[in-house]
């Protein structure tokens, strides 16, 4: 063990990826702290009903926001790693594709919103937040830094945005501002992060990528990412449709109660994405070098994800009521039971994020789409069945079941992914061999 530690200490690649992960972890822990001290303060100030409306608007917009991403995130990182000489063309092309995607989303929302039961104020809030999707196009800068294992720069940008956002929200609470101002802060968050990314990229003294676009590369990117476009939409559907359906079936107050539990449960969802994104270049390199090394790294990643998820879930399970009372107050006490159930979905979220990288590396995105489709449909069906019978707790059970089916069980259905199912099973059951 000592010999291995000394080896890793002197291994430049390991140190680089470790530092990359530490920077991302530090930024996300600051985000959790801000969420606890600022986000929850906002929830307590607004109360269950107003917080429920705010959560509903965010959830509704997020479902359509998956379209604006165009499934390009992981694809772009892969191409930047494999073709660094075409950096500017890939960044510029992806940037303009995302801009077009944002406008398409707003047009789609204009067509769909009239068929909802929303009042005029709610619809105004939705379109204000949707306007922020345009600034999401600057995420291509983050993917460039990811491909270069330069999380430090991305983390600094996000910390600046987080600090500005937190200060503004604290001021709004202290000045007893109306809900509309908290909605506007959401757009400001997207704008300030885009500005930070732009400045960080300019400081690298790189050419302006937005001046370049290649329609052949655009077609190839869309061809590779189209399953992920629908997959991204479906992921947001079965992550946020519960709040939309609770609003339609129960009301804003119940959305507020459910959202309080979800805010705690999902607070740690950044961890699997952070780890997977940080290690993605290393796993990609292993795949290009040695198949056995590639499988070993994937298996270690899966096992680590399970252990990490269980470590987080257990305290939420045993201290759910106390956590809700401590953080949100007596007004949200009903959320304790929801948290007890919803927290266990984290195990499948952690595994699903890591497994998604395997599907991408094997160019099997179409199966990701199918699996996610099954999960989304199942979640909607289970919500229809369970919410009328069990209320907001039923929505939590629907989430847990649908996540487990989509992220884990569906791997056993397809011949090409059964090996991945075995690796996932080995991690869940803590077995060395299956």
Image: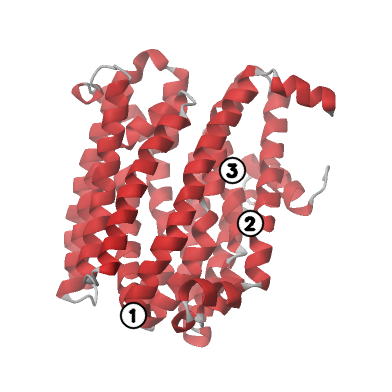
Count of marks placed on residues:
3
Give the position of the N terminus as an image quadrant.
top right
Residue at the outermost bottom position: 389
Between label 3 and label 1, give the one nearer the viewer.
Answer: 1
Residue sitting nearer the eye, 369 or 393: 393
Residue 80 location, quadrant: top left
Label 1: how many residues lie within 10 Å, few (<14), some (14-19) or many (20+)? some
- Disc 1 secondary structure class: helix
Residue at 73% in and 25% down: 292
Check the image and report above or below for 156 versus 380: above
Q: Would you place residue 205 above or below residue 232 in this image?
A: above
Earlier in the chain: of badge 3 and badge 2, it is 2
Q: Residue at x 42, y 43 (%)?
A: 228
In percent of width and height, residue 217 lies at: 31, 24
Residue 123 shows up from this direction: yes
> Where residue 354 is drawn, which disc sits there?
3
- Residue drawn at x 68%, y 32% as measured from the top left: 297
Instruction: Tell me the distance, in whole angstroms, between the alpha carbons under discs 1 and 2.
Output: 30 Å
Give the secondary structure at mark 2: helix
Between 428 and 309, the one lying in front of the other is 309
Q: Which residue is mark 2?
A: 347
Mark 3 to mark 1 CA distance (whole Å): 36 Å
Q: CA distance from mark 3 to mark 2?
A: 11 Å
Regarding mark 3 in the picture, which secondary structure is present there?
A: helix
Q: Which residue is mark 1?
A: 49
Q: Quadrant of the C terminus?
A: top right
| Label located before the other in sequence (3 or 1) | 1
């Amino acid at each position: 063990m000592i010999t291995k530690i000394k080896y890793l200490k002197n291994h430049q690649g390991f140190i680089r990826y470790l530092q990359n992960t530490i920077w991302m972890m530090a930024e996300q822990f600051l985000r959790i702290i801000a969420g606890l001290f600022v986000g929850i303060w906002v929830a307590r100030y607004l109360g269950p009903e107003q917080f429920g409306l705010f959560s509903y608007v965010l959830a509704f917009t997020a479902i359509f926001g998956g379209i604006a991403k165009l499934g390009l995130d992981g694809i772009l990182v892969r191409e930047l790693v494999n073709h660094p000489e075409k950096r500017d063309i890939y960044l510029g092309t992806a940037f303009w594709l995302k801009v077009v995607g944002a406008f398409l989303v707003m047009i789609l929302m204009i067509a769909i919103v009239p068929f909802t039961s929303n009042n005029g104020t709610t619809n105004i809030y939705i379109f204000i937040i949707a306007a922020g999707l345009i600034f999401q196009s600057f995420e291509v800068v983050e993917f460039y830094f990811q491909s270069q294992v330069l999380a430090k720069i991305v983390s600094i940008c996000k910390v600046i945005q987080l600090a500005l956002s937190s200060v503004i929200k604290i001021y709004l609470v202290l000045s007893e501002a109306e809900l509309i101002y908290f909605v506007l802060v959401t757009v400001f968050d997207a704008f300030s992060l885009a500005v930070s990314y732009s400045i960080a990229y300019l400081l690298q003294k790189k050419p302006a990528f937005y001046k370049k676009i290649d329609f052949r590369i655009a077609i190839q990117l869309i061809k590779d990412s189209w399953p992920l476009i629908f997959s991204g939409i479906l992921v947001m559907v079965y992550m946020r449709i519960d709040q939309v359906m609770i609003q339609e079936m129960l009301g804003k107050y119940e959305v507020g109660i459910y959202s309080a539990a979800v805010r705690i449960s999902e607070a740690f969802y950044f961890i699997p994405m952070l780890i997977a994104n940080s290690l993605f270049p290393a796993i990609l390199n292993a795949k290009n070098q040695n198949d056995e090394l590639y499988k070993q790294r994937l298996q270690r990643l899966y096992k680590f994800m399970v252990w990490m998820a269980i470590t987080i879930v257990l305290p939420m399970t045993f201290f759910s009521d106390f956590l809700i009372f401590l953080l949100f107050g007596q007004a949200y006490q009903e959320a304790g039971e929801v948290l007890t159930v919803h927290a266990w979905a984290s195990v499948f979220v952690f595994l699903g994020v890591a497994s998604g990288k395997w599907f991408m590396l094997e160019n099997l995105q179409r199966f990701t789409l199918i699996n996610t489709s099954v999960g989304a449909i199942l979640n909607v069906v289970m919500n229809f069945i369970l919410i009328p019978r069990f209320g907001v707790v039923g929505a939590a059970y629907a989430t847990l079941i649908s996540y487990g089916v989509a992220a884990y069980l569906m791997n056993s259905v397809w011949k090409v992914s059964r090996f991945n199912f075995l690796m996932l099973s080995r991690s869940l059951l803590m077995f060395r061999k299956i």
